[in-house]
Image (cartoon, rainbow, N blue to C red):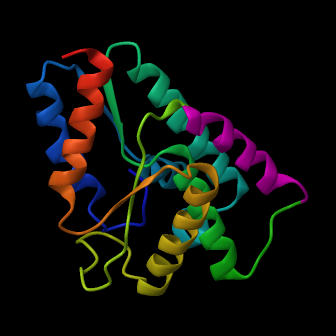
Amino acid sequence: MAGTHSTGKSTFVAALRPRLEDIGLRVAIVHDSAADAQELGFGILADHGFDSTAWLIGNAIRAEAVASLHADAIIVDRPVPDALGYLLAALRHQRRDLGPGEYGRLEAVCRAWVGEYDLVFVTELDEGVPIGPGRPDDAAFRSAAALAIADVMRELAPGALPLRVGGVEGAIGTCIDMARARSGT
């Protein structure tokens, strides 16, 4: 599940998990670790930089690998390219650049890892849906992040499916069908 904040990713994850468990799968959820990054002192959202993005990507890969030890299905709330999208949005928003080759190195890691995902959804921003409580209320950055994440996902995961407001049941059905086909249930 990739996409900017307050676009339904967590709601989708919460709805999908029990449906996968109902067909007998052991499910793990890997959540976004931006709050952990911020607690460590990394800049996030509009303050993303090379180091924070590298940490988020590395931490996501670690968490996904650990989850694979015990789960039949792993639901990832923010796959590794999502961090790259936030970085791109931050760079555009702050009108700044990275050092030579830094973006390319991060992109190479994301490009290599994205093949590990069987199915990728990208939420679409509906600006009529308010930003959730406790979330940053910078609507301009939220829109910039939505565009940048969509750009990155089109490049790195061209088969990603859109997840629109009201499309949760259809997306869950797609996930269940794939899970059944993969597990033989």
The residue located at (14%, 46%) in the rendering is: 15
Question: Of residues 35 and 41, which is closer to you in this image?
Answer: 35
Residue 168 image position (x, y, % from top left) = 19, 56
Q: Position of residue 25 (x, y in %)?
A: 20, 20
Horizontal arrangement in the rendering, residue 108 relative to residue 40 (left or right)? right
User: Which residue in the rendered view is the most extreme toward the left?
Assistant: 22
Quick check: is 181 in the magenta stretch? Answer: no
Image quadrant where one finds the C terminus: top left
Magenta: main secondary structure equals: helix
- In the rendered view, would you say 183 is above or below 155? above
The x, y position of residue 182, in whole percent, is: 33, 21
Residue 164 position in % (x across, y down): 29, 67
Residue at (50% x, 55% y) in the render:
38
Image point (51%, 37%), residue name: 60
Q: Is residue 117 above or below residue 150?
A: above
Image label count:
0
- Stretch of the chain drawn in magenta: 100-115
Q: Is residue 163 left or right of residue 83?
A: left
**Viewer-nearest residue: 116 or 27:** 116
Is residue 105 located in the magenta-colored stretch of the structure?
yes
* Figure check: 16 above or below 65: below
